[in-house]
Amino acid sequence: DQQVKQNSPSLSVQEGRISILNCDYTNSMFDYFLWYKKYPAEGPTFLISISSIKDKNEDGRFTVFLNKSAKHLSLHIVPSQPGDSAVYFCAAMVIRGNTPLVFGKGTRLSVIA
Amino acid sequence: NAGVMQNPRHLVRRRGQEARLRCSPMKGHSHVYWYRQLPEEGLKFMVYLQKENIIDESGMPKERFSAEFPKEGPSILRIQQVVRGDSAAYFCASSRLMAAGANVLTFGAGSRLTVL
């Protein structure tokens, strides 16, 4: 049973346009959400996070939106650049429970020049 | 300020042999996590350790797998009598102790195990 789901295995976007990566979760106890980015042959690197007390967090070209009632979050990248081509993992955790991060399967983003 | 260091980066073993994967956390980080990524899958939690203690091993197979994080030296993930299904990328991550607030994990580059 997957607690964090990324239903789109891949996404292609033109350079300069918006990339929207989606993530759904089933565990209502999750209260902290993170996005990691992974290039081939490298480890995942932290990108952006959001606490459940917020519905939006922005960092430069990256914005994460959280809809708690729908148990859904999304990562927006505007404008998309070829260097953004990577696998993006959504992850979630319960802060107070000190539980490990639970990851989705990832979405492979390809930004086409 | 080196990041999380994992070695070897690539390891090839024959069925039945042992695999040992090492992880040195970031300086100042006292928590180590091991994750496994099977082909076409996401990162699956295996084990969470602090120095000399296993905190959570709920994701680790009960047989053949063990992990340690000794007082001195790196954390080691050990897989005995490897089988083809153990072929995967094994990622180590570390974090600083945070009393309140989330652990943002810093990952190593991974160790890719291939079992022939």
Image (tube, rainbow, N blue to C red):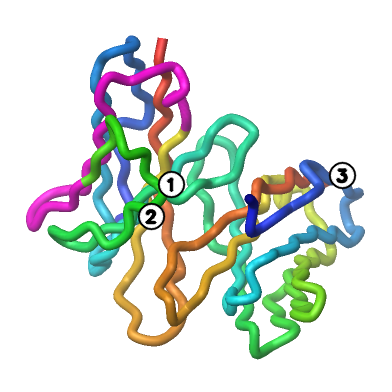
Above or below residue B43? Residue A59 is below
Viewed as shown, does residue B108 lie left or right of B75? right
User: In the rendered structure, which segment of residues is drawn in magenta?
Assistant: B68-88
Q: Position of residue A10 (x, y in %)?
A: 80, 42
| Amino acid at pointer 3 | Ser
* Mark 2: few/some/many CA within 10 Å (<14, 14-19, 20+): many
Above or below residue B111? Residue B92 is below
Q: Position of residue B115 (x, y in %)?
A: 40, 16
Residue A12 bears which disc, if any?
A: 3
Q: Residue at x 43, y 72 (%)?
A: B103
Residue position marked by numbered label 1 in the rendering:
B35
Residue B93 bears which disc, if any?
A: 2
Task: Give the Cα separation between the discs numbered 2 and 1.
Answer: 8 Å
Dot 1: chain letter: B
Dot 2: chain letter: B
| Amino acid at pointer 1 | Tyr
The mark that comes first in sequence, 2 or 1, is 1
* Mark 3: few/some/many CA within 10 Å (<14, 14-19, 20+): few
Q: Secondary structure at mark 2?
A: strand
